[in-house]
Image (cartoon, rainbow, N blue to C red):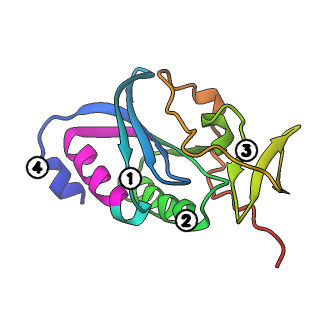
C-alpha cells in the first residue's frame, strides 16, 4: 500500500474523523483542526467505508485518525474499527477514539428493539422503552483532540442474553 500511495505524488496532510456507529456513516477531513471536507454515506459500513478511505488516501496524507468507537450497531462498529486499525498499523498513523455521545449532543442512541444506549454520569447503559432520534450524529467544525483517547478499542455495550 505504501508503494501505491507514494505514486500519488504530493498530498496535503489531514486528520480523518469517522462516525461509523450507524447509517449513514459520517466522516470529515481536518487541516490544522478545521473541517475542510464532510462526507455522509448511506449504506453499510462494509460497503461505503472502503471506497471513502480509498479516495481520501489518494488525495491526502493522513497524520491522525479519529473515530467514534460506540455504542451503536455492533457490526458497524466492528467493521469501522477493523478498517481504521488496519490503516493505523499499516501506514503508522495514530488512531484515537471517543464515544459516540460526543457527536450527538449526548442524546440516546438506538439499541435493540425499543431500547436505547444512554450516558449518565459518565456511565453508558441500555434503557428499555426509550425512543432514540435517528441520524443525530454530526461531525464538528473544529476537531477537539482533548475529547479523544489513545484507548481506541471498540466500545461494545451489549445486553445480557
Q: Tell me which label, 2 or 4, sits earlier in the chain.
A: 4
Q: Residues within 10 Å of mark 4 (few under 14, many from 20)?
A: few
Q: Tell me which label, 3 or 2, sits earlier in the chain.
A: 2
Nearer to us of marks 4 and 3 is: 3
Q: Tell me which label, 3 or 1, sits earlier in the chain.
A: 1
From the viewer's perspective, is 138 left or right of 62? right
Query: Which residue is rendered at x = 27% and y = 56% of the image?
Result: 51
Q: Quadrant of residue 160?
A: bottom right
Q: Quadrant of residue 8?
A: top left
**3D distance between C-alphas at marks 1 and 4:** 30 Å
Q: Tell me which label, 4 or 3, sits earlier in the chain.
A: 4
From the viewer's perspective, is 118 left or right of 44? right
Give how far across and how far down residue 123 sits, in percent.
85, 46
Nearer to us of marks 1 and 2 is: 1
CB-based contact (under 8 Å), mark 1 and mark 4:
no
- Name the residue that disc number 1 marks: 42
**3D distance between C-alphas at marks 3 and 1:** 21 Å
- Name the residue that disc number 3 marks: 108
Q: How many marks?
A: 4
Q: Name the secondary structure under disc 1.
A: loop
- Name the residue that disc number 4 marks: 7
- Name the residue that disc number 2 marks: 78
Nearer to us of marks 2 and 4 is: 2
Query: Which residue is rendered at x = 15% and y = 35% of the image?
Result: 10
Q: Residues within 10 Å of mark 3 (few under 14, many from 20)?
A: many
Amino acid at each position: 500500500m505504501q508503494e501505491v500511495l507514494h505514486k500519488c505524488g504530493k498530498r496535503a496532510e489531514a486528520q480523518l474523523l469517522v462516525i461509523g456507529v450507524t447509517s449513514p456513516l459520517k466522516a470529515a477531513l481536518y487541516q490544522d483542526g478545521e473541517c475542510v471536507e464532510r462526507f455522509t454515506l448511506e449504506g453499510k459500513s462494509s460497503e461505503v467505508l472502503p471506497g471513502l478511505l480509498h479516495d481520501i488516501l489518494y488525495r491526502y496524507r493522513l497524520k491522525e485518525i479519529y473515530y467514534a468507537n460506540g455504542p451503536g450497531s455492533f457490526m458497524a462498529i466492528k467493521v469501522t474499527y477493523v478498517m481504521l486499525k488496519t490503516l493505523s498499523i499499516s501506514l503508522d498513523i495514530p488512531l484515537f477514539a471517543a464515544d459516540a455521545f460526543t457527536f450527538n449532543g449526548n442524546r440516546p442512541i438506538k439499541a435493540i428493539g425499543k431500547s436505547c444506549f444512554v450516558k449518565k454520569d459518565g456511565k453508558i447503559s441500555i434503557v428499555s422503552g426509550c425512543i432514540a432520534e435517528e441520524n443525530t450524529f454530526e461531525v464538528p467544525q473544529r476537531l477537539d483532540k482533548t475529547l479523544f483517547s489513545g484507548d481506541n478499542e471498540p466500545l461494545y455495550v451489549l445486553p445480557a442474553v
